Image (spheres, coloured by chain):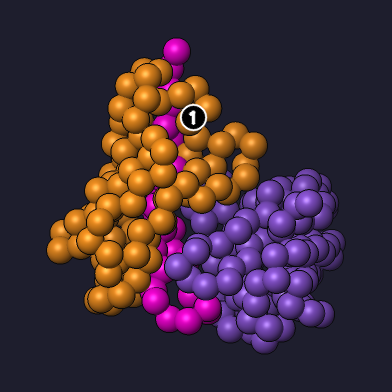
Chain colours: A purple, B orange
Amino acid sequence: DTAVSQTPKYLVTQMGNDKSIKCEQNLGHDTMYWYKQDSKKFLKIMFSYNNKELIINETVPNRFSPKSPDKAHLNLHINSLELGDSAVYFCASGRHESYGYTFGSGTRLTVV
Amino acid sequence: AQTVTQSQPEMSVQEAETVTLSCTYDTSENNYYLFWYKQPPSRQMILVIRQEAYKQQNATENRFSVNFQKAAKSFSLKISDSQLGDTAMYFCAFMKKRGSQGNLIFGKGTKLSVKP
């Protein structure tokens, strides 16, 4: 069983479209995260949810909206996609900070 | 704000040899956690090793070990008996000790190539 699963793995879409990325974890963790990895491989946190409550909301355009229907799911919806949104988006979950995070396999988003 | 610096963008090593990847960080916190993650070409982020700042003993996981120097704010990763499968991006990361809501802060990574 995959611990943190993201769908889709690849997403190619046109500018201006709206798209969603789904994430589910079966580890029983209370906290889930979205990270963005840019073309230079730099990883930066976007959002953090703890038990469905938004904890961290970094400086991210409000076109990005996370939604957590329950503590096992954290989806990312992106409106009006722009070329600069092209990146790999990682979902992760964590139980306690001493253990680090478990990451999903990432979603490569390409905006054309 | 915390920062993590990896000063070696790329490194290479011959198979079976030993290589050390550098990481320094800046923080005013006294209690925190440090991690090394591996990202092979498959893109998956894999936790390699972790260190708790209040433990002086360096962490070890099989061929992977760290040299943690708290006063110098240094956290290097040593890979012994390098294998071709160790070829990957390696990221150093920092997290404050602050409940389960911690923000994992990453360095920019070191691309390691293991040559046959």
> Is residue B1 rendered to the left or right of residue A1?
left
Q: Is residue B113 magenta?
A: yes
Q: Which residue is mark 1?
A: B87
Q: Where does residue A88 sit, x and y in percent of width and height?
A: 65, 51
Q: Amino acid at mark 1?
A: Thr
Q: Quadrant of the C terminus of chain B?
A: top left
Can you say whether A71 is above or below B83 in the image? Answer: below
Q: Where does residue A14 sit, x and y in percent of width and height?
A: 82, 53
Q: Chain of mark 1?
A: B
Visible residue check, residue A50: yes
Visible residue check, residue A78: no
Q: Where does residue B102 sit, x and y in percent of width and height?
A: 48, 75
The residue shown at (75%, 52%) is A2
Secondary structure state at the residue bearing disc 1: loop
Can you say whether A49 is above or below A27 in the image? Answer: below
Can you say whether B112 is above or below A106 in the image? Answer: above
Residue A81 found in image quarter? bottom right
First to last magenta residue range: B90-116
> Is residue A110 rendered to the left or right of residue A95?
right
The residue shown at (36%, 59%) is B51
Q: Is residue B25 magenta?
A: no
Q: Residue furthest left?
A: B71
Q: Quadrant of the N terminus of chain B?
A: bottom left
The residue shown at (37%, 19%) is B16
The residue shown at (41%, 68%) is B95
